[in-house]
Image: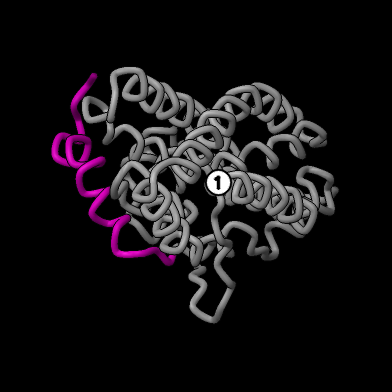
């Protein structure tokens, strides 16, 4: 591969690692907001541990993204010194926690996505991505099992828990198309056998979602013209800016501080 090809591949890897790393970071930050506020002690600990898993995955991806960019930026630089237009996280990840049903639904959608994504990336031609996926898939298997169990408990529980869960599904569904939107970055990485087929990924995700919906007696919302996309271009909902103002405050207020 010539230097231009290598540069193009590095740029695509940088962008792709931001998408995974940013989504894990923002999802972990959201789950971290539950710390000390869980509906039960055991669940409080579970949500906090899931948040830590996601932050750990984010660190690995943002570190590798910085290496591919080649400008000397670290994981901390990428996490704390970009504005919202520089973030590439999925729109779904930045949605507010709402009630417990809303949080579980959001995390169920994301966990199913990451689990099947990492299953694909285990076969990546990129050794770093491959190793990352092999480790992270084990964590996502637990996340998916945990959130699936809650979807079934809430959906097949009381009338109120079912109604709250269905409302959460209806509210968050419009962000799910954003998960599978593809662009030139995806094409470059797929052609180099670094990533898998997005169409297949969507099929496996849809099958997992459908099985759980069936057991939880949930109705799958219809896709429509109001589906929200744009994360790959740095276009986000109003919620991300508020999150970043809290998450990045200390580092930006004291840029020379040593921790």
**Quarter-of-image position of residue 186:** bottom right
Percent position (x, y) of residue 230? Answer: 50, 68
The residue closer to the viewer here, 100 or 15, is 100
The residue closer to the viewer here, 129 or 36, is 36
Q: Residue drawn 61% across and 42% down?
A: 112
The residue closer to the viewer here, 24 or 164, is 164
- In magenta segment, residue 244: yes
Residue range in magenta is 235-259
Report the residue marked by disc 1. Answer: 216
**Quarter-of-image position of residue 80:** top left
Badge 1 local density, few (<14 within 10 Å), some, or many (20+)?
many
Percent position (x, y) of residue 187? Answer: 76, 59
Viewed as shown, does residue 37 lie left or right of 91? left
Q: Residue drawn 27% across and 49% down?
A: 243
**Which color scheme did the rendering employ for the protein?**
one colour
Q: Which quarter shows the C terminus?
A: top left
Viewed as shown, does residue 201 lie left or right of 114? right
Dominant SS type (magenta): helix
Q: Is residue 151 above or below residue 222?
A: above
- In magenta segment, residue 139: no
Outermost residue, bottom side: 225
Outermost residue, left side: 253
Q: Is residue 8 above or below residue 147?
A: below
């Amino acid at each position: 591969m010539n230097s231009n090809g290598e540069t193009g591949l590095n740029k695509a890897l940088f962008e792709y690692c931001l998408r995974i790393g940013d989504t894990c970071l923002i999802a972990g930050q959201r789950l971290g907001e539950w710390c000390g506020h869980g509906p039960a002690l055991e669940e409080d600990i579970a949500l906090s541990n899931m948040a830590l898993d996601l932050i750990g995955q984010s660190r690995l991806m943002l570190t590798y993204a910085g290496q591919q960019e080649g400008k000397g930026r670290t994981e901390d630089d990428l996490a704390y010194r970009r504005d919202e237009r520089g973030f590439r996280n999925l729109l779904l990840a930045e949605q507010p926690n709402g009630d417990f049903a809303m949080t579980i639904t959001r995390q169920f959608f994301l966990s199913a996505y990451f689990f099947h994504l990492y299953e694909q990336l285990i076969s990546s031609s990129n050794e770093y991505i491959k190793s990352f996926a092999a480790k992270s898939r084990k964590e996502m298997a637990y996340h998916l099992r945990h959130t699936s169990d809650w979807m079934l408990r809430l959906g097949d529980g009381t009338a109120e828990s079912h109604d709250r869960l269905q409302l959460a599904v209806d509210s968050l569904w419009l962000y799910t198309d954003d998960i599978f939107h593809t662009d030139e970055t995806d094409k470059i990485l797929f052609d180099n056998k670094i990533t898998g087929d997005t169409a297949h990924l969507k099929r496996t995700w849809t099958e997992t979602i459908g099985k759980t919906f069936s057991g939880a007696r949930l109705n799958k919302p219809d896709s429509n013209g109001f589906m929200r996309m744009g994360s790959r271009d740095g276009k986000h909902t109003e919620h991300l800016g508020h999150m970043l103002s809290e998450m990045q405050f200390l580092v930006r207020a004291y840029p020379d501080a040593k921790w």
